[in-house]
Amino acid sequence: MGATMAYQILLDAQRGIGVIPVSYDDDVHPYSDLREGRVDAVLLDHIIAQRALKRTGGLVIQPEPVAVGHYVAVLARRDSVLRDSLDLLLKAAMADGTLERILRRWDVWDARQAALFQRVVAGSAVGTDAGRVVLSRAGSYLPALLRAAGVTLVLSFLSMGLAVLTGLAVAAGRIYGPWLLGGLLTAYVEVMRGTPVLLQLFVIYYGLAPVVRLPAFLAAVLGLGLNYAAYESEIYRGALEAVSATQLEAARTLGFTEAQILRLIRGPQALRYALAPMTNDFVALLKDSSLVSVITVIELTKQTAIYATNVGSWVIPGALCGIVYLAMSLPLASLARRLERRWRVPA
């Protein structure tokens, strides 16, 4: 899970032995992905792993721990009296064996806790690794944010390319195809526009897993691309139908085939009509790419959330994320305006 000690350990291992960490928002999907073979291993607390083993089955817990952590209760500074009372109650429960009996009853006891209880009851403080709590500076996270921005760009371009090609095919099928094909394509458009893209991502990645196990990045491209293809098809259909019927009839009178009319007359004019809404859709897709974090793709927004959680504030991470998104979207809008000026028909 992101922003946990386990995730930090994997980040350190990535630099040392080449482990590729994958971040999750919950402790259920990691184990289902492990069972499906999408990941090689899961690193989480022993208690969580034991529960996942009972729930999922077919998995093995490695006996040797990677690290030792402590569960703590965090209270507001003004609640110092409550804090001290909780400490006394826990120490008493450790001393008389009550806490051990509770942990054994729920099958979460191991021998290492006995040594911890002895130190606490004896009055020694539980040590903390201060080095893991130190807030990293913004500059140390910038490379990770830039790498995640690269993932966002690649994902957005691939998804938009799929959306454009599929949208063109759907629009052409609805205009030129038989009524049955037009009806099926209309149903596709309405389903994709009428259901949340988040739901579609879950269906493609998790719902299809028993049939085909798609990599997370491929599932993200398919989910975003097929969803935006429905919107693109409506843009292209409207642009094609906006071309004057008089021009089409004149072309047919001159003996042009429908393919020639589309390539030489209808298509170029429709492209000018569709350029502005296409640009808007690409910028929207760039931002909607943040949704793919639910299927473990570490893009810009997900990396920013990990950064913000680790430093305990969204101010600097949010500002950096916004700057990077603007840096990616503004050049696209500028390019679209230049193309519109170049292709503008004189009055």
Image: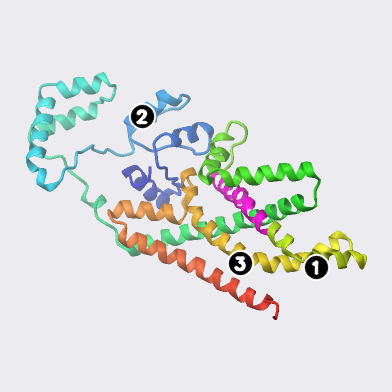
**Is residue 221 magenta-colored?**
yes
The amino acid marked with disc number 2 is Pro
The amino acid marked with disc number 3 is Ala
Q: CA distance from mark 1 to mark 3?
A: 19 Å
Residue 265: mark: 1
Residue 63: mark: 2
Q: Quadrant of residue 214?
A: top right
Is disc 2 in contact with disc 1, using a CB cutoff of under 8 Å?
Answer: no
- Magenta stretch prevailing secondary structure: helix
**Is residue 139 magenta-colored?**
no
Number of residue marks? 3
Q: Secondary structure at mark 1?
A: helix
Mark 3, Cα crowd under 10 Å, few <14 / some 14-19 / many 20+, is: some
Mark 2, Cα crowd under 10 Å, few <14 / some 14-19 / many 20+, is: few
State left or right for residue 205 relative to residue 109.
right
Residue 142, percent across and down?
39, 63
Q: CA distance from mark 2 to mark 3?
A: 59 Å
Q: Nearer the viewer, residue 139 or 9?
A: 139
Residue at 40% x, 51% y: name it: 16
Residue 62, percent across and down?
39, 31
Residue at 73% x, 68% y: name it: 269
Which span is picked out in magenta?
Answer: 216-236
Q: Earlier in the sequence, mark 2 or mark 3?
A: 2
Q: Earlier in the sequence, mark 2 or mark 1?
A: 2
Residue 46, percent across and down?
33, 31
According to the picture, the residue beneath numbered tag 3 turns out to be 276
Q: Secondary structure at mark 2?
A: loop
